[in-house]
Image (cartoon, rainbow, N blue to C red):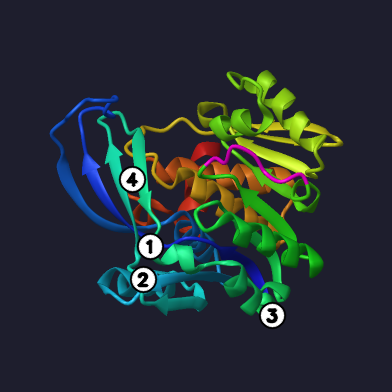
Amino acid sequence: MNKLLVIGSLNMDMVIHVPSIPRAGETLMGTLHGYIPGGKGANQAIAGGRMGPGTAMIGLVGRDQFGERLLDGLKEAGVDAYGVSVCPEPTGQAVISVSADGENSIIVLPGANERCDVSYIKDHEAQIAQSRVVLLQMEIPHPAVFEAIRLAKKHGCTVVLNTAPAPESLPDEVYPMLDYLCPNETELSRLSGLPVNDPAQAETAARALLDRGAAAVLATLGKNGALLVNREGALRVPGFSVKTVDTTAAGDTFCATFCRRLADGEPIKECIRFANAAAALSVTRPGAQSSIPTLEETAAFLRAQEV
């Protein structure tokens, strides 16, 4: 039994440091920081693995050095990579610009991730059936995401969808299959069609998605922490004040940490608080997977906050 199964993308990130995020038509000089393992799916699998044993992943990489590095990273984090196959397409890549204030802009080249299609998901139904919590994002073909959601629900898994990169919409039939819909402020606004500029507006937008059938919406609100909205009410869990170096993978760290704690049966508020702490730690470090903290680091951070 997998406590957490992550289905999604694996990319190699080319990280470039720039003075500011380029505007349309603007040319800036940048500095290559390096090639760092990433991809929203792989980031989330790594985060789950670093929170304790029992995380597995489904996805694809290319038959190249980037694919080898990504597979090595999963194994080093204790992730079961049985469901990650090697294919002839090149490994997915992402070009990430990181500004001096820690904000980022990302362009994704899907590569092998395009092979993670509906038939590939169906071939891994047995692995889905053996999982407690299934976490997905939107960096593999969307029909495959929706098929994985259907199979996870069929087998009684807790289904969590992180709506990143933000789609314009989700099919109506998907919402009732979601136990947790996890957007950031931009994604929440796009899906609901409502403004999200503060926690009150976020709650209104989240309720619009509950009306479409989602059981709960767990939105990340940056400096305002996280907001859980379900049919019983709303709960906002404050974040932590830290010096931001790089926000890459903060959302991935939050989602996977929440899911991993949820799979362990922790109370919801504590799951969110722990996820907030892990995400806060991640933004104090550069890179994607290189920034994701371990269980021990996150617990120590929380103890220090209490003192």
Residue shown at 74%/59% (left/top)? 158
Under mark 4, the amino acid is Arg
Nearer to us in this view, 106 or 254? 106
For this view, does 74 lie left or right of residue 91?
Answer: right
Q: Would you say residue 54 is visible in this rendering?
A: no
Tell me the quarter of the picture where residue 4 sits. bottom right
Residue 208 in percent (x, y) is at 76, 30
| Camera-nearest label, 3 or 2 | 2
Mark 3 or 2, nearer chain start: 2
Q: Can you identify the residue that label 1 sits on?
A: 111
Tell me the quarter of the picture where residue 35 sits. bottom left
Q: Would you say residue 14 is visible in this rendering?
A: yes
Residue 183 in percent (x, y) is at 60, 39
> Above or below — where is 198 with respect to 246?
above
Mark 3 or 4, nearer chain start: 3
Tell me the quarter of the picture where residue 290 sits. bottom left
Q: Can you identify the residue that label 2 sits on?
A: 89
For this view, does 263 lie left or right of residue 88?
Answer: right
> Label 1's element?
helix
| Camera-nearest label, 2 or 4 | 2
C-alpha separation, residue under disc 1 versus residue under disc 4: 27 Å
C-alpha separation, residue under disc 2 versus residue under disc 1: 6 Å
- The reply to whether the C-beta atoms of the residues labelled 2 and 1 are less than 8 Å apart is yes
The residue carrying pointer 4 sits among few (fewer than 14), some (14 to 19) or many (20 or more) residues within 10 Å by Cα, namely: many
Q: Which mark is residue 285?
A: 4
Residue shown at 40%/71% (left/top)? 61
Q: Can you identify the residue that label 3 sits on?
A: 126
